[in-house]
Image: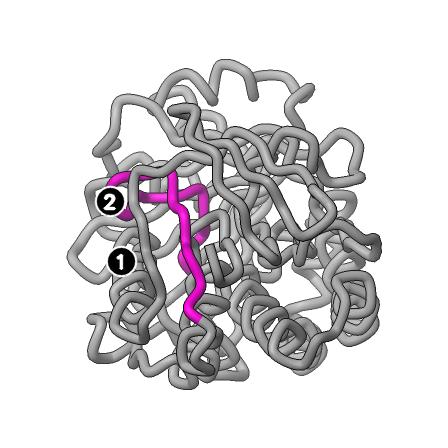
Amino acid sequence: MSGAAIVGGGPAGAAAAIALARAGLRPRLLERDAVAQEKVCGEFLAEDAARGLAELGLDLVALGALPLRRAIFAAGRATAEIKLPFAAWSLPRARLDAALLEAAAAAGAWVEMGMAVAEAVPDGSGWALRLADGTALHAPALVLATGKHELRGLRRAAQGGALGLKLVLQGAAPDAAVTLLVCPGGYAGLQPRPDGGANLCAALDPHAAGVAAAARSAEAFVAHVAQGSELAARLLGAMRPAMARPLAVAGIPYGFLHRGDGPFRVGDQAAVIPSFCGDGVAMALRSGLRAAQALRAGVTAPAHHAAFAADIAGGMRIARGVSAAALRAPSVMIAGLRLFPGLAGLAARRTRLG
């Protein structure tokens, strides 16, 4: 292999592939799935994500994204609503990932689907990769874009973590809104999908009562979120699961920020913003573009990680604080939103990391 190996074909990996290919450095992108799949993701895209996609040649409107204009918060009997202080959209991850991978191939990247990497280790002149079928590859540089999943020998330096669940629902969610629903052990986001139905995605404490059952059954997941607020019970009571069980990812280290050496980490391998703030895709795009820029300039992985961490550290601190407030004192937070809606808009803008 003459170009960098990119392990993972989500937004971060695809962004890095597009940028490197445009610079004439043909990367090899290895994606374990044969086709783009749904991922545990809230599917919320703000204007910073739109800018990153535009830089890569993609337009959210052309992709059929659904505009979002407001945010609704609910816990117990309390609710609050704010107008989003920026443009935002809803777009299924499978559709977004497919478009990005197509753009990467069109730019000249070597995109290989259905290629699972089992292990990657430094070998002195770059990286030695072993695929799940036993094939051995070598690359001068490695971009780790495996998202919430770990690669053997290259685990993130993070302990514990939340359980992420995602379920596609049939029925109508609040129009043009992302609805944030506090529930036992965490919170969930309910959002309409462009082709009908809704996406229900949650970040939960895996040790909280009822969470284990929620991970095994769509009905149990819906019931778990519904018990958190009157609004959730009313909305979810009129909807039906389109899947037998939710998609699940364990050990998500929300608040993690990588500052070490190793491969060029991008997306959730570089930083995991609390899902409450909805900027994960934008940050993934930005990290992929920044890694490609660093590789072109000959910047080392540790230097790249330090610069990226310094760039987003302030927004990450605000995101952690907002997420903690939602979990520890949701009724107080909702009361504050009603009294000072401008502060909610300010916090939302300050957590746009992309």
Q: Which residues lie in the magenta part?
A: 26-44
Q: Main structural element of the magenta stretch: helix, strand or loop?
A: loop
Amino acid type, mark 1? Ala
Q: Is residue 274 above or below residue 235?
A: below
Q: Please state which of residues 189 and 8 is positioned toward the viewer in this rendering.
A: 8
Residue drawn at the location 80% of the way across and 39% of the way down: 157
The image quadrant of residue 226 is top left
Which of the 4 image quarters holds residue 122?
top right
The residue labelled by disc 1 is 98
Q: Amino acid at mark 2?
A: Val
Q: Position of residue 211 (x, y in %)?
A: 56, 21
Q: Is residue 339 above or below residue 167?
A: below
- For the point 48% across and 34% down, the residue is 136
Callout 2: 10 Å neighbours few (<14), some, many (20+)?
A: few
Q: Is residue 354 visible?
A: no
- Seen in the image, is 203 located left or right of residue 326? left
Expressed as whole percent of the image width and height from the top left, the position of residue 209 reads 63, 17
Along the viewing direction, whichever of 192 and 343 lies nearer the viewer? 192
Q: Which mark is residue 35?
A: 2
Q: Are marks 2 and 1 in contact (CB under 8 Å)?
A: yes
Name the quadrant of the C terminus.
Answer: bottom right
